[in-house]
């Protein structure tokens, strides 16, 4: 049975305060008084729950952060970057997950666990950033060597028309899991390679990254939408090698960057109609109609952190929709504060680990979202992936996490998931959650650095030009 969100009384947030908080954090995405007023008019703050949340103070940019908050956020970003440095294997790929509180010996043993190509792609961005003057964790030469090692390994992975499996065993490099080829995860590997090469300004890396990009036949991976006739990317191949019937047919922040890659490709590119004809799939969440509102936080974050979504047009303002979706996720948790102790202090619903199933001892991975049955689990690291979009709301989580003494949730690489009702904390953090947190923190603290580099890519410029002609 689905959980039912209460219809609690709501009051309108100060229009200017929330608009400034979101517009500043979005780096000018909501940059006119009309846009800000229209957006703020849709925002609400829940008044239900045992401890009703106060409206956070407006944060318009990194310069508006209090010094202790800025220091803490930089610490969290550096910890998240270290995830990818610590968990990159000798072959260049990066572990899908790692224990957040384990000893060095325990973590070394965990390097037999699977590697994720999407986590590796995000990791290439983090590795490049590790060499920046803002972080100074490794040298530029080390960053280039690490990225090169990954891109050379990517050449050797089994591929079908440019797409590779999602998971590989860390020790044997045999592919594992349920997909023999995954379009979205392969797209992240390509995107991370292109971004890192651009950021590090290294010609050899650019050649290697473009080699991976150019070998993709996007038309091969496109089916025909039954309604519009426009091409729509399929999800890949199952473990038997058969084509998945499921398609990436929603317009949301999870898939946008992949379509920009497909449209901006030099060869075998998709036409702009592929982007223009994606569907909205609206859902009611906490009293608001949100595109893909039945899904977790990640769908409002991924492309929103990598790209400037306003530059590509489409049938919805995805940057603004992302901000609305994140606020609705917050409200959905607050609406359940009377039912779950966790949501009196924390918020954040996204696909990730939760408490073990009955009779089990291993944490259970679930598709947490406002539309699903909930158990009081909050995904703090997933909310860090929205810190530049809604910094005041995310900082509320951060402050609560730092204040919580038991159970401890701040580990080696940031925050584990938490369920106060079951006195549970996740053992692991997951690479893609950590990766989007790195991008979001960098965008907030350093003036949209990740988005700026992405927009400089030749593929991004081609996609923007083609979509502007529609």
Image: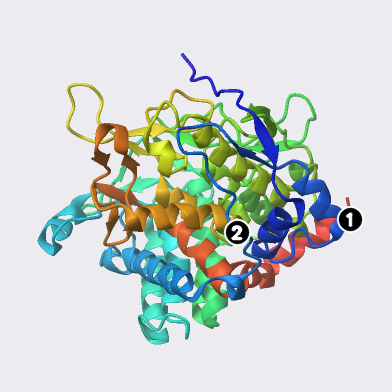
| Towards the viewer: 92 or 391 | 391
Please report whichever mark, 2 or 1, sits nearer to the chain's N-terminal start: 2
Residue 456 at x, y = what percent?
Answer: 68, 73
User: Does the rendering let one see residue 119?
Assistant: no
* Residue farthest to the top, as pictured: 1
User: Dot 1: within a 10 Å radius of its alpha carbon, few (fewer than 14), some, or many (20 or more) residues?
Assistant: few
Quadrant of res 93? bottom left
Residue 297 at x, y = what percent?
Answer: 53, 43
Report the number of numbered marks.
2
- Residue 469 is tagged as 1
Which dot, 2 or 1, sits closer to the camera? 2
Residue 465 at x, y = what percent?
Answer: 82, 62
Q: Please give the name of the residue rendered at 48% of the width and 50% of the height, measured from the top-left corner.
A: 383
| Towards the viewer: 424 or 427 | 424
Which residue is labeled 2 in the image?
57
* Residue farthest to the left, as pictured: 105
């Amino acid at each position: 049975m689905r959980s039912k969100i209460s219809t609690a009384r709501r009051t309108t947030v100060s229009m200017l305060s929330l608009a400034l908080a979101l517009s500043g954090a979005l780096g000018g995405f909501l940059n006119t008084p009309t846009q800000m007023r229209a957006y703020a008019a849709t925002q609400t703050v829940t008044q239900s729950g045992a401890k009703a949340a106060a409206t956070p103070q407006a944060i318009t940019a990194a310069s508006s952060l209090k010094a202790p908050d800025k220091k803490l956020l930089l610490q969290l970003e550096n910890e998240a970057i270290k995830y990818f440095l610590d968990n990159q294997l000798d072959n260049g790929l990066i572990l899908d997950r790692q224990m957040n509180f384990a000893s060095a010996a325990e973590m070394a043993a965990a390097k037999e666990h699977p590697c994720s190509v999407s986590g590796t792609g995000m990791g290439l961005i983090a590795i490049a950033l590790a060499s920046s003057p803002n972080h100074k964790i490794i040298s530029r030469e080390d960053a280039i060597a690490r990225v090169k090692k990954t891109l050379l390994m990517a050449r050797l992975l089994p591929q079908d028309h440019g797409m590779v499996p999602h998971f590989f065993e860390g020790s044997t490099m045999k592919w594992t899991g349920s997909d023999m080829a995954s379009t979205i995860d392969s797209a992240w590997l390509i995107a991370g390679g292109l971004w890192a090469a651009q950021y590090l300004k290294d010609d050899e890396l650019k050649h290697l990254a473009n080699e991976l990009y150019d070998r993709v036949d996007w038309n091969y991976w496109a089916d025909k939408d039954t309604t519009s006739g426009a091409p729509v990317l399929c999800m890949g191949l199952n473990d038997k090698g058969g084509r998945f019937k499921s398609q990436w047919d929603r317009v949301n922040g999870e898939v946008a960057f992949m379509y920009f890659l497909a449209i901006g490709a030099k060869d075998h590119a998709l036409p702009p109609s592929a982007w223009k004809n994606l569907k909205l799939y609206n859902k009611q969440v906490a009293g608001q109609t949100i595109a893909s509102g039945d899904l977790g936080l990640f769908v409002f974050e991924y492309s929103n952190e990598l790209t400037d979504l306003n530059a590509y047009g489409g049938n919805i303002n995805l940057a603004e929709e992302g901000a609305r979706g994140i606020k609705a996720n917050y409200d959905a948790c607050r609406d359940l504060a009377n039912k779950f102790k966790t949501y009196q202090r924390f918020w954040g619903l996204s696909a990730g680990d939760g408490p073990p199933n009955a009779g089990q001892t291993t944490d259970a991975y679930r598709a947490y979202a406002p539309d699903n049955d909930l158990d009081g689990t909050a995904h703090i690291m997933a909310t860090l992936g929205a810190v530049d979009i809604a910094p005041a709301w995310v900082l509320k989580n951060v402050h609560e996490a730092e204040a919580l003494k038991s159970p401890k949730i701040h580990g080696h690489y940031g925050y584990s998931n938490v369920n106060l009702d079951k006195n549970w904390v996740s053992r692991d953090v997951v690479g893609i959650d950590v990766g989007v947190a790195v991008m979001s923190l960098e965008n907030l603290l350093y003036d949209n650095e990740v988005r700026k580099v992405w927009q400089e890519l030749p593929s991004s410029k081609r996609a923007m030009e083609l979509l502007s002609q529609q």
